[in-house]
Amino acid sequence: MAAAIETKQLTKSYKARQAGTINVVDHLDLHVEEGEIFGFLGPNGAGKTTTIKMLLGIIYPTSGEGYVLGKEIGDMDVHRLISYLPERPYYYEHMTGLELLKFYGSLFGITDKEKFVQLLEKVNLHRDMTKPISNYSKGMQQRVGLAQSLLNDPKLLFLDEPTGGLDPIAHREIRDLILSFRDEGRTVFISSHELSEVELICDRVAIINRGVIAAQGKLTELLKGGRIEITAEDVPASLLSDFNIVDANIRTLPSGLLLDMPEENDPNSVIDAIRAHKGRVISVVPRRKRLEDLFVETVSTPGVKS
Amino acid sequence: MRPILSIAATTVGEAIRRRVLLVILLIGVLFIVVAPGLGILSARSETTVLRAFMLGVIQGVSMIIAVILTVYMIPNEIERRTIYTILSKPVQRWQFLVGKYLGAVLSLLLMMSMMSAVMGVMFFLQQQSKNPGEIADLLKGPAMYFIQMCLLAAVGIFFSTFLPPLVNFFLSIGVFLVGTFFNPLFQTLQENKNTAPMVKLIAQGVNTFLPNFANYNVQNPIINPTQQIQNEGRYFLGVTVYGVVYISILLIIGILIFDRREV
Ligand SMILES: Nc1ncnc2c1ncn2[C@@H]1O[C@H](COP(=O)(O)OP(=O)(O)OP(=O)(O)O)[C@@H](O)[C@H]1O
Ligand SMILES: [Mg+2]
């Protein structure tokens, strides 16, 4: 599959207060496939928005290269095929939802009112489309923003913290919309620190910290290395020494034996052995690695940055 | 062209909802309405003072509106992040800037037309149709001011591509005042035989460089009591061309700055 976004050593530096410059985005190598939902994760100030702005040509890289849909960044033709929902967006408040779509539509030369109404229906705002945006709730503003971002039927969407500051119901609505974008064959690039959100919908992620990529890849692969906890009773002591599992913790609890082992070390054979020796398996609990663990792990690792 | 017009229309939509501008406009209209009733202004059988007063109000109010309208134009778009969504669409930066400028010009046209219409009506009522041709003559003043304000708006937008609003506010007004009063001073300097050549040269430089706002003040009978324009149509055309050229240069430099700028 072709790359929707590709950056090579993309760097943005600003003059620091005291001395010299700091790399807010530091030699970034990103790779986003067409048709996937890509999560761009990082703590506050990591450089997520800065990266997106560079990819959109709103600010200029200090060095490095970037390609969006195969074209070098800054290429105006690409702007017909992409769209952008800024973080905490603000719209001209005197407009109604419908007027807003008319305005942004006109920037593409789109004047089809039916299309505007359709989009507003898609984001469930058609009943409020003649109300001024200043009267919209945050969730409604975010939804009108998504409607706006679909005007040109984009192949690639940049969504900067699309669920920031929204309640759980609004979260869910936005999440469902984003999933529908993928079903329609669009590529979605989401910047976020709402990990639970990203975990549910993203195919691949990159974790960025202080401008540097700390991890990038398929979510399923990054989250490998989960553990399994097996609780069992009546396990003969002789068996314990036979297990010989790498990186396992065995503890004796009042309720029995607790065996905590890496997922990839074949827990099935352990369970079989226990049962073969007349032991009783009480529970098998997978302790999946969560995105949050990975995030905290990568972000708090010191010395990533030189 | 379409994006430019949409951006201009949106800018007008915003401008006519800005409370500050509306209040200033209202004050201007109010002054024009009460002017004929003020004893000092209508005491003389001559209408000179009344004319000058009304024109002065229109000019002053338009100047403040032009400056307030333009100094916030780019900084506000950036601060409110409305510019990001626009620039992520197939809109070039020059189109954005020209659209914004056009919006400012249209807003000025709207607001100045309103004040001029009120002035025309008040003048007509006061004169009791003694000479309707005089009203048409009177309206030439605001027409000139309109071009003057278009020039001022270009100065404001030009500075707003790289300066914060407050600095720009004083700078634009400063440029307007200097550009209004320097030219007459320059004329005197040139005519005076005692002026040192060096001073003349510097004055010449400043005069060419500064926008000449004085060009557009000829209709005010108090400011220019003696000035006689031989060929009015030609004069008007001349200063209009001057304005358009100057505005174009300002916008082009503004675009070059804005293109390189981080937003
Ligand atoms: N124009 C600028 N001049 C100097 N520093 C800047 C500028 N713009 C951004 N920065 C710095 O760059 C860093 C990254 O900012 P950025 O907005 O990209 O972070 P982010 O990952 O989007 O964070 P958040 O989650 O808070 O949105 C921050 O430390 C910020 O202070
Ligand atoms: Mg951000």
Image (tube, coloured by chain):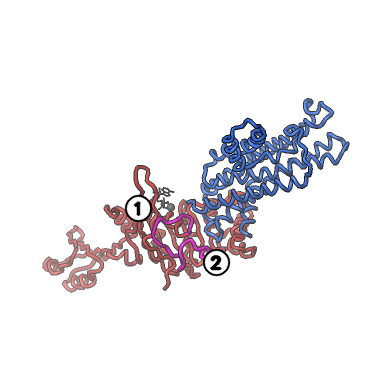
Query: Mark 1 — residue?
Result: A210
Q: Where is residue B124 shown, x and y percent of the image?
A: 83, 38
Q: Quadrant of the N terminus of chain B?
A: bottom right
Towards the viewer: B113 or A277: B113
Q: Where is residue A274 shown, x and y percent of the image?
A: 18, 70
Q: Residue furthest right?
A: B130
Q: In the displayed structure, would residue B108 be above or below residue B28? A: below
Residue sitting at 78 percent across and 28 percent down? B41
**Hue used for the chain lettered B:** blue
In this orientation, does residue B13 appear?
no
Where is residue B231, by image quadrant?
Answer: top right
Task: Name which residue type carries label 2.
Answer: Asp
Towards the viewer: A271 or A255: A271
From which residue to which does the magenta span run? A56-78
Left or right of A15 in this view: B7: right
Q: Which chain is red?
A: A
The answer to whether the residues at label 2 and label 1 have Cβ atoms under 8 Å apart is no
Q: In the displayed structure, would residue B193 be above or below residue A235? A: above
Towards the viewer: B10 or A257: B10
Task: Name which residue type carries label 1.
Answer: Arg
Q: Secondary structure at mark 1?
A: loop
In this orientation, does residue A165 appear?
yes
Residue sitting at 71 percent across and 38 percent down? B217
Q: Where is residue B131 shown, x and y percent of the image?
A: 87, 38
2 vs 1, front mark: 1
Where is residue A282, by image quadrant?
Answer: bottom left
Answer whether residue A177 is magenta in the image: no
Query: Mark 2 — residue?
Result: A153
